[in-house]
Image (tube, grey):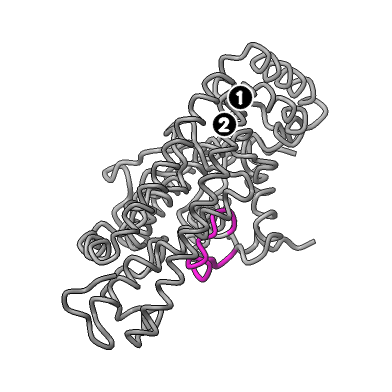
Amino acid sequence: MSFDTKPGRGSERVKAWVYAILNPLIDSLRRETELLSTGNLSWRVHSRRCEYIRPITELIDPNQQPNLEDFLAEHPTFADRFRQHDSALGAIEKATAESVQLLLRSPSFQEQVKHSLANYEALLPHNPTYPDLLEERGKITEYVAEFLVNNTRSLPRHYTLYAFWKEYAEGFQPYSAGFDETKHQNVRGKARELRGISEQLRVDLEALRLTLVREYDIPAAPIDPTRNTYAENASPRFR
Amino acid sequence: MQSPGILILDTGPIWELVLYNAVTQFRFASLRPSLTHFVSIEAYEHCGTFLASFRKRTTSASVVAQLYNFIRHTDKGGQRQLWELVYEEFRRMDMDEHVVKLLDMDLDLIARYGPTDVSLIEIAIRNFRQNPVILTLDSPLHSECGKARIRSRLLIEVCNPVS
């Protein structure tokens, strides 16, 4: 950090970095590493992206872009770290899309889905609580691929595929091998890499926040959030 | 046993499902205070069992507009993620959606309850043969349903069933 003019004690400018940039990033990176530690990439077939793991700029309120630019002007090493994070995320999204594409084309995987569905339909007369999946038929293969890539072990009870997944999730696990082995390992490897990057980035941002709040004698979060003029948090929150 | 009936969801229960997922699955801890009904996993699961007991689930386009109103009052950075959760609930529950035109709704009822509640009542009336039930957390709508002889359930009862 090298200032031409060093901000003073209680600096509004430093508060803007802490409240509008550091806090939302730390919060999001913490969430991101928790998801990655459970093997959940939050990847979606329909959008082909990890919905809850986002590039750094998307974690900041767009209105706070000038504060982000100001922060990076004074802390240029973080620009590279952010790029490294986003590049690792882009690599996972690409690798996952390729892996899922191969899985969806795999005859053995298609056969497994078809077989499970036939078994499920045979169970329907004996299990009146199980919904029929007529409406879902065309989408089940994609849903299963999504559950596998996100390591989804169970579904909420009110989801149409709850009973199907409860019955057949275990049977599908070996079909992680139905993923092209190399592609699948590639996704897992890139997920580990991103987790490492995110964890270290969070630790360093937390350390910087501590330094700033000590040096400029400011609270780490606004004391009265309703009077905060900065974005308080990139996570959704009622105002 | 799955009911042959149709469940019509008001905004409150859908929002509660979205919030629960946001808090528990995606760690949006700041939203936890907004959860009013799913205060325990049991409450959430009781509701899940109730929802799953209906063969069809539907809602009104006005409910989607109300969800927008909720989401736009949250921090901008997380709005897309909240919408993704709404989409997820609709997709995974196989939720249907009906449009009820303003001119098809009773003016007196609109003035008293607003277009969202009245659209739900109208959907129930249109699907009367399918044994409709409205799920809401709104007591005035619940009592209006009683007067109109439409079955309705309050989310609080569904979350805490009498054993």
> Mark 2 to mark 1: distance in Å?
6 Å
Tell which of B102 and A84 is nearer to you. Answer: A84
Q: Is residue A51 left or right of residue B162?
A: left
Which quadrant of the view contains residue B108?
bottom left
Is residue B146 in sight in this rendering?
no
- Mark 2 residue crowding within 10 angstroms, few (<14) / some (14–19) / many (20+): some
What are the residue bounds of the magenta stretch?
B24-37
Say which quadrant the C terminus of chain A sits in: bottom left
Q: Is residue A100 above or below residue A32?
A: above
Q: Is residue B93 above or below residue B38?
A: above
Residue at image mark 2: A186
Q: Residue at position x 22%, y 65% from top?
A: A70
Tell which of B98 and A62 is nearer to you. Answer: A62
**Tag 2, which chain?**
A
Q: What residue type is disc 2 on?
A: Asn
Tag 2, which secondary structure? helix
Q: Residue at position x 54%, y 25% from top?
A: A100
Tag 1, which secondary structure? helix
As for residue A197 lying within the magenta part, the answer is no
Q: Which labelled disc corresponds to residue A182?
A: 1
